[in-house]
Image (cartoon, rainbow, N blue to C red):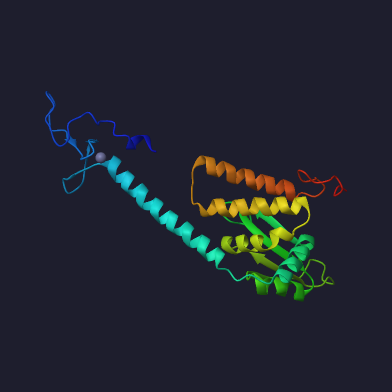
């Protein structure tokens, strides 16, 4: 609860009253807040009550958006179990979960991507979890074209993780999936408090550490080193 919401002047009489020795009338709102602000129209406004009303309105919109999002994700088209298992296995070898900067002015964003020189492989992912497809010629002109499938939409990212996570094998990949899921869900909450921002930055660093080669993920056997 915001401290301003606890009626600080609850003991004061309601309505208007004249204070002894005061040069002009002091106005109180229905909740008993002292009103010092006058609209251009000459009416007194209670900033405390106004702010509270706006907060409640914003919260209702936020809850509705969260509900719509949950419904959208639950209603997604899911590939068959076999397809999901195949995708998880292939993604574990070739795919990447990351939280990267990618030129976004607002900071790092969650990304799911997979690169392959075999277009068929990338096509399967793009067909089941539609995102962006790109063909890139590597610096070496004799190298083969590389096809990349990328998911940037947070709902699609959550759908992909929910579909494939049960079949991921390595502790590192599972940790990354968990972290990315946490990230897209936290972003959907639309809270912009300093605490949320700090947690976001922390997830970014954690993901970077997990994506760094040669460092074992927490709980992972020390076999991936070197
Ligand atoms: Zn008020």
Q: Residue at x 29, y 45 (%)?
A: 50
The image shows a total of numbered marks equal to 0
Q: Quadrant of ligand 1?
A: top left
Q: Position of residue 7 (x, y in %)?
A: 29, 34
Asked if 27 appears above or below 42 in the picture, the reply is: above
Image quadrant where residue 173 sits: bottom right
Does residue 74 appear left or right of residue 1 in this picture? right
Image quadrant where residue 105 sits: bottom right
Q: Quadrant of the N terminus?
A: top left
Residue 16 visible to an observer of this rendering: yes
Does residue 158 appear left or right of residue 28 in this picture? right
Q: Position of residue 134 (x, y in %)?
A: 69, 71
In the foreground, 67 or 201:
67
Q: Position of residue 165 (x, y in %)?
A: 70, 58
* The residue positioned farthest toward the front in the image shown: 81
Q: Residue at x 69, y 68 (%)?
A: 149
In the foreground, 149 or 30:
30
Asked if 204 appears above or below 104 in the picture, the reply is: above
Residue 108 visible to an observer of this rendering: no
In the foreground, 8 or 133:
8
* The residue positioned farthest toward the top in the image shown: 21
Image quadrant where residue 117 sits: bottom right
Does residue 200 appear left or right of residue 63 in this picture? right
Q: Position of residue 94 (x, y in %)?
A: 78, 63
């Amino acid at each position: 609860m915001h401290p301003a919401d606890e009626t600080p002047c609850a003991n004061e009489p309601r309505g208007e009253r004249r204070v002894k020795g005061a040069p002009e009338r002091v106005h109180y709102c229905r909740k008993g807040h002292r009103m010092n602000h006058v609209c251009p129209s000459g009416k007194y406004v209670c900033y405390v009550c106004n702010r509270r009303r706006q907060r409640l309105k914003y919260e209702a919109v936020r809850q509705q958006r969260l509900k719509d999002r949950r419904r959208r994700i639950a209603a997604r088209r899911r590939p068959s179990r076999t397809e999901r298992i195949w995708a998880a296995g292939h993604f574990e070898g070739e795919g990447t979960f990351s939280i990267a900067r990618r030129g976004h002015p607002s900071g790092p964003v969650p990304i799911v991507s997979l690169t392959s020189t075999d277009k068929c492989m990338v096509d399967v992912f793009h067909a089941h979890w539609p995102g962006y497809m790109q063909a890139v010629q590597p610096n070496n002109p004799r190298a083969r074209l590389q096809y990349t499938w990328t998911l940037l939409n947070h709902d699609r990212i959550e759908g992909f993780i929910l579909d494939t996570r049960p079949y991921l094998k390595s502790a590192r990949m599972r940790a990354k999936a968990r972290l990315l899921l946490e990230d897209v869900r936290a972003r959907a909450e639309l809270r912009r408090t300093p605490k949320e921002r700090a947690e976001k930055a922390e997830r970014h660093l954690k993901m970077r550490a997990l994506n760094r080669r040669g460092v074992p993920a927490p709980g992972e056997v020390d076999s991936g080193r070197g």
